[in-house]
């Protein structure tokens, strides 16, 4: 999760804690901003982060490795690492806080930048307007929270319109919605203004209160049997719990 527009001096201190077999990243508070199973550093530990991969249900699985995934807000690097190491897709992360990047490299097994992996230190709201990214992203993961994890930092119709402009015609955006002050309905309305009423899907909230919403650049309505077949293939190939997703993942309207 990334931070709001602050000067570098105001960015929260990054810390790490270990809870048995799981390592957590914090931003100056007890709130967990990302996690990693220490003996499986490239697996997705948190349930909501697994659900951020729901775009695979709409992807051509044979072509996944030829695409481009982007994460806004590095957190503990879980999505970036999974996309790079497991999906073998070209992966970009945009993170405001250089401390987060340094900690991810030192404590969370984030690989160095290379031909198919890059971390851009920048304000996500500005960087996604860079023309070089427009129309290049097949899977966009948005997980932008401040250190208090109270509500999404970027959540306006204009922001989501910029996100939509990043996507390829078949691309999808997944967004984590969580927090004491957040309004699911307001966020959904903002996404609908940018993507259209028929473009949105959502999971039921996790036990921890995270709701993952998916928005399609080009809305489709695959039949349940088609989604079930795709879910089975994803689970077999990448060990994600997709077979149970379809019970809690449905089209939504604001």
Image (cartoon, rainbow, N blue to C red):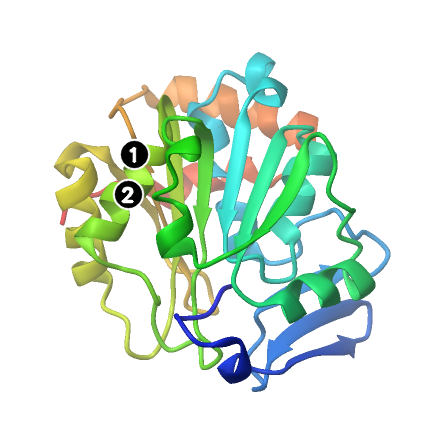
Q: Using the rendered view, name the quadrant where residue 102 is placed.
A: bottom right
Q: Residue furthest top?
A: 62
User: Residue 121, how many percent across, how many down?
Assistant: 56, 56
Q: How far, Cα to Cα, is label 2 from label 1?
A: 5 Å
Quickly name the residue at label 2.
Answer: 162
**Disc on res. 165:** 1
Q: Residue at x 60, y 36 (%)?
A: 91
Q: Residues within 10 Å of mark 2 (few under 14, many from 20)?
A: some
Could you classify mark 1 by the number of other residues whose Cα lies within 10 Å: few (under 14), some (14-19), or many (20 or more)? many
Q: Is residue 42 left or right of residue 79?
A: right
Percent x, y for residue 232?
Answer: 57, 25
The answer to whether residue 122 is left or right of residue 223 is right
Residue at point 50%, 29% (across, down)? 56
- The image quarter in which residue 62 lies: top right
Q: At x 65% / y 61%, what residue is drawn?
A: 76
Whether pointer 2 and pointer 1 mark residues with C-beta atoms closer than 8 Å, the reply is yes
Residue 250, can we see it?
Answer: no
Please state which of residues 45 and 76 is positioned toward the viewer in this rendering: 76
Residue at the bottom extreme?
A: 29
Q: Is residue 146 visible?
A: yes
Q: Position of residue 123 (x, y in %)?
A: 44, 59
């Amino acid at each position: 999760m990334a931070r709001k527009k602050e000067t570098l001096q105001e960015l929260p201190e990054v810390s790490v804690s270990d809870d048995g077999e799981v390592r957590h990243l914090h931003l100056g508070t007890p709130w967990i901003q990302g996690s990693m199973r220490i003996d499986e550093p490239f697996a997705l530990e948190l349930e909501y982060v697994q659900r951020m991969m729901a775009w695979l249900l709409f992807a051509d699985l044979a072509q996944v490795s030829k695409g481009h995934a982007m994460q806004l807000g590095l957190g503990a690097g879980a999505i970036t690492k999974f996309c790079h190491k497991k999906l073998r897709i070209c992966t970009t992360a945009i993170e405001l806080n250089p401390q987060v990047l340094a900690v991810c490299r030192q404590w969370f097994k984030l690989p160095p930048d290379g031909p198919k992996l890059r971390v851009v230190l920048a304000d996500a709201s500005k960087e996604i307007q860079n023309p070089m990214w427009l129309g290049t992203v097949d899977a966009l993961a948005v997980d932008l929270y401040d250190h208090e994890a109270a509500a999404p930092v970027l959540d306006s119709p204009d922001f989501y319109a910029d996100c939509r402009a990043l996507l390829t015609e078949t691309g999808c955006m997944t967004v984590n919605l969580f927090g004491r002050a957040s309004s699911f309905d307001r966020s959904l309305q903002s996404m609908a203004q940018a993507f259209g009423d028929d473009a949105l899907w959502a999971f039921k909230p996790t036990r921890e209160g995270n709701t993952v919403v998916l928005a399609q650049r080009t809305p489709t309505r695959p039949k349940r049997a088609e989604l079930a077949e795709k879910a089975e293939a994803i689970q077999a190939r990448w060990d994600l719990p997709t077979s149970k997703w379809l019970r809690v993942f449905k089209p939504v309207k604001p």
